Amino acid sequence: MFDINKIRQDFPILKRTVYNRPLVYFDNAATTQKPQVVIDAISKYYEQDNANIHRGVHYLSQMGTQAYEESRKAVKTFINAEHDYEIIFTRGATESINLVASSFGKKYLKQGDEILLSGMEHHSNIVPWQIICEEKEAKLAVIPITDTGELNLTDIEKRFTDKTKLLAITHVSNALGTINPIKRLIDIAHKYNIPVLIDGAQAVSHLKVDVKELDCDFYCFSGHKVYGPTGIGVLYGKEKLLEEMPPYQGGGEMIRKVTFEKTEYSSLPFKFEAGTPNIADGIALKAALDYVSSIGLFNIALYEAELLHYATNQLLNINGLKIYGTAKEKAAVISFLLENIHPYDAGTILDKLGVAVRTGHHCAQPIMDWYGIPGTIRASFALYNTKEEIDGMIKSLQKVIEMFS
Ligand code: PMP
């Protein structure tokens, strides 16, 4: 059962006020708030367990190693990967994509090749590819989008050519909320033997992800967008590809044997985890995933769909308000603009009224350019948000309109 009052009790920050008003936090696509169990896991680590992991023979080091590796297993279970060594810990989705762009790109990209993306990618799934493409004299190819903010899949098969080396695409758009038909795209790509990377940064907190069922080759996400800490993220990769790819960074932990002449690298996942990892946040990520699983992604998705539906209907009642991103399949993200009011001005006033939304291009400038707008106001919901909070946002938006009329 989904008990919203109990859930809200789990998030201490929801008790605070801003400008003497209760906090209404609708910036969940940027980062989610943390339940007490995650905060406790971080404090407990530093209060009682702190030690460096993986090489220590002493008690704390061994306990820390065990907890960190338990977290890797929890990620494996959360996304239903085949092996825990296919889970690489990174700083976040951005680093996960950079890792693949750099390592996969070094190994497989050559002059004239293409990386296929979509028109709704976050900069994190554009710029790392541009960097490696520049080095390799390869280029980007882009699946266009439609007015509703969905992928334009007309002629999709023709976009996979003998030059295409990888499809890198977002599961859920952070700017529009669109849920992409990634299973279909993965199946098409695989027909042409092209591997697929899925940017799941906006998906894992809203949808059940099963990498085995999807059969994607890489899947990335950030801990902080799924109620976990900042500074920890995940790259899932299929064993065969990860084995073939060269290391991303060199240093301690990722080696088996070092001499001045030659270094033998460690096995997976350590080959891709140079240096002391983010131990505390890695351990606390398990607390976050356990928390989400205890509520159940199915229940979360149902509840958030209700919020999305409610908010969309309320917003559409506001004169001069336009929603960007009206896909049939959407996560609980709404981007909109008020006629003749700059999104930044609206966002600033909403903030003073206690409503935290995001304004701007949401690190997805190509999609803003496509719509010919500077940015949007984005309200993005999480499992602890309520219809009453949405009512509050609507009232505040009406105040904004009054102020500008
Ligand atoms: N991809 C998408 C779709 C995102 O929304 C974000 C974060 N806004 C990222 C990638 C990057 O995530 P992070 O900044 O946590 O690395």
Image: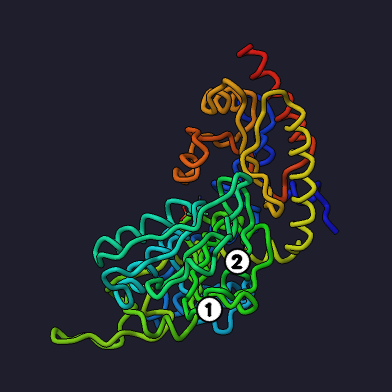
- Is the CB atom of the residue marked by disc 2 within 8 angstroms of ligand 1's nearest atom? no
Residues 313 and 94: in front is 313
User: Quick one: label 1, few (<14), some, or many (20+) residues within 10 Å?
Assistant: some
Count of labels shown? 2
Residue 64 seen? no
Amino acid type, callout 2: Ile
Q: Residue at (70%, 55%) from the top-left corner? A: 329
Q: Which mark is residue 182?
A: 2
As drawn, 163 above or below 3: below
Q: Position of residue 359 (x, y in %)?
A: 53, 34
Q: Position of residue 259 (x, y in %)?
A: 17, 86
Residues 137 and 364: in front is 137
Q: Which residue is mark 1?
A: 190
**At numbered mark 1, what does the secondary structure look like: helix, strand or loop?**
helix
Which residue is most to the right? 1
Horizontal side of 347 relative to 247 (left or right) equals right
Quadrant of the image containing the C terminus: top right
Residues 321 and 363: in front is 321
